[in-house]
Amino acid sequence: MFSHLMRSVASCRRVLTHFQSPILVQTRTLMKTHKGTAKRWRKTSTSYKRGRAGRNHGNAGWSRSSLKSLSGKTLAHSTHIKHLKRLLPYQ
């Protein structure tokens, strides 16, 4: 059943022994970008920034000062930088 495979392996072995040093091609697996993280975070010079949560709906009755603190962008905490670098390798 496997005789044709064994013949092809033997022929490959013959080809490899014909050369003095076989050429080895080493490939590296590429890291994948986490697309959910890429949509939420942007790279700055030393850190990452994101929009703040909690401002889209359900804000009736909130004071203006508490809503103002939720607006704008914020930087990543220093303990999260290592994880973000792994999730966003090419940014």
Image (tube, rainbow, N blue to C red):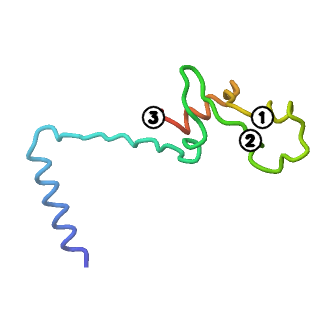
**Residue hosting label 2:** 53
* Residue 65 occupies quadrant: top right
User: Would you say 59 lies left or right of 83 here?
Assistant: right
| Element at label 3 | loop
- Camera-near label (3 vs 2) is 2
Foreground residue among 51 and 83: 51
Residue at coordinates 25% horizontally, 74% vertically from top-left?
2
Secondary element at image label 1: helix
- Res. 26 image quadrant: top left
Horizontal arrangement in the rendering, residue 53 relative to residue 42 (left or right): right
Residue ID at (54%, 41%) = 38
Q: Amino acid type of disc 2? A: Ala
First of labels 3, 2 by sequence position = 2
C-alpha gap between disc 1 and disc 3: 29 Å
Quickly name the residue at label 1: 70
Q: Earlier in the sequence, mark 1 or mark 3?
A: 1
The picture places residue 21, in percent across and down from the top left corner, at 15, 37
Residues at circles 1 and 2 in contact by the CB criterion of under 8 Å: yes
43 on left or right of 71: left
From the image, tell me which residue sits under label 3: 90
Residue at point 56%, 43% (across, down): 39
Mark 1 vs 3: CB contact within 8 A: no
Measured in 3D between alpha carbons, the distance from the residue under mark 1 to the one under mark 2, in whole angstroms, is 7 Å
**Horizontal relation, residue 59 to residue 19: left or right:** right
Residue type (three-letter) at the residue carrying disc 1 = Leu
Place of residue 87 in the rendered image (x, y in percent of width and height, measured from the top left) = 55, 39
Which amino acid, by three-letter code, is at mark 3?
Answer: Tyr
What residue sits 59% from the left and 36% below the top?
Answer: 41
Q: Position of residue 12 (x, y in %)?
A: 16, 56
